[in-house]
Image: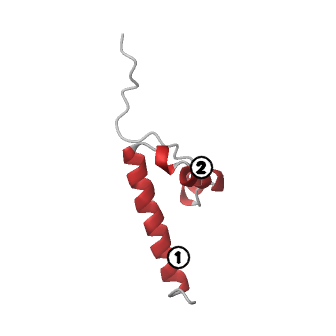
Amino acid sequence: MENEVGLLGDSRDRCKEANEAFAGAAPNELMDYLQKNKSSLLPETRKLWDVTVRAMTRAWAARTGPARG
């Protein structure tokens, strides 16, 4: 017996509410957990996390201008 779902592509819900949530900010609880536990993330997840944090930092700097002080 096999225990596979046979999924091709993604499995994200595409209803209106799900699309709105997906387009919004990630929950603070999730972001806090990932930051606090980044050393125990799977290598693939850690790589994505590192890229995401760098992108967020660049995006924030682009919106607010250069750091002062």
Q: Is residue 57 above or below residue 12?
A: below
Q: Position of residue 8 (x, y in %)?
A: 34, 35
How packed mark 1 is, by other alpha carbons closer than 10 Å (few <14, some 14-19, many 20 or more), is few
Q: In this view, does 27 lie above or below 12?
A: below
Residue bearing the label numbered 1: 60
Q: Is residue 12 above or below residue 20?
A: above
Q: Element type at marker 1?
A: helix
Q: Quadrant of the N terminus?
A: top left
Q: Where is residue 42 in the image (x, y as percent from the top left)?
A: 42, 42
Q: What residue type is labelled 2?
A: Tyr
Determine the residue positioned at 63% across, 54% down.
Answer: 27
How packed mark 2 is, by other alpha carbons closer than 10 Å (few <14, some 14-19, many 20 or more), is few
Between marks 1 and 2 in the image, the one whose residue lies nearer the viewer: 2
Residue bearing the label numbered 2: 33
Q: Where is residue 55 in the image (x, y as percent from the top left)?
A: 44, 68
Determine the residue positioned at 40% across, 25% down.
Answer: 5
Q: What residue type is labelled 1?
A: Trp
